Image: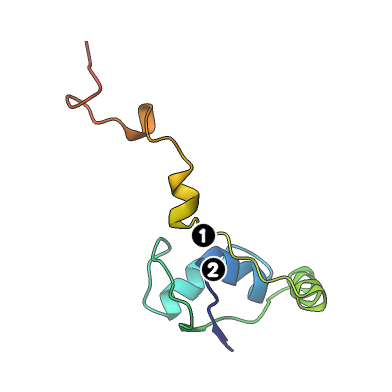
Amino acid sequence: MKITVKERQTLLDIALMTAGTVAAAIEIAEANGLSLTDELSDGQVLEVPEPTSAREAQIVRRYRAQGVEPATEASADDLGLCAYGGINFMGIEIDFEVS
């Protein structure tokens, strides 16, 4: 099955929406020559698996019935709201001193 990516969707969003589980993101990435961390483009077409269990199929049906199309990638505006600093943004021997 093929799906067209919408703005700000990630492989995890696509996996949950089309296969009912984020675990399918690995399979989707491999099938499309992508890495799990690759950014997707609006309009990009991906090959995606069908749900493999009754529970996953139920999740997909519910998403479709309710029109849920997750898009969780952070935008530049979102990142601008974050104050850059702290341990996650420091470099050893640059602005983080090890004693």
Name which residue lies at 48% across and 67% down.
26
| Residue drawn 76% across the image and 75% down it | 67
Q: Residue 66: x, y in percent?
A: 81, 73
Disc 2 to disc 1, C-alpha distance = 6 Å
Quick one: label 2 or label 1, which is nearer the N terminus?
A: 2
Instruction: Check whether the beta carbons of the residues at disc 2 and disc 1 lie within 8 A of each other.
Output: yes
- Residue nearest the viewer, comparing 90 with 15: 90
The C terminus is located in which quarter?
Answer: top left
Q: Is residue 31 left or right of residue 21?
A: left
Asked if 17 appears above or below 96 in the picture, the reply is below
Disc 2: which residue: 9
Mark 1 belongs to which amino acid?
Glu
Mark 2 surroundings within 10 Å by alpha-carbon count, few (fewer than 14), some (14 through 19), many (20 or more):
some
Badge 1: residue crowd in 10 Å (few <14, some 14–19, many ≥20): some
Q: Nearer the viewer, residue 42 or 52?
A: 42
Image position, residue 71 (x, y; %) = 59, 65
Foreground residue among 82 and 21: 82
Place of residue 5 in the rendered image (x, y in percent of width and height, measured from the top left): 53, 78
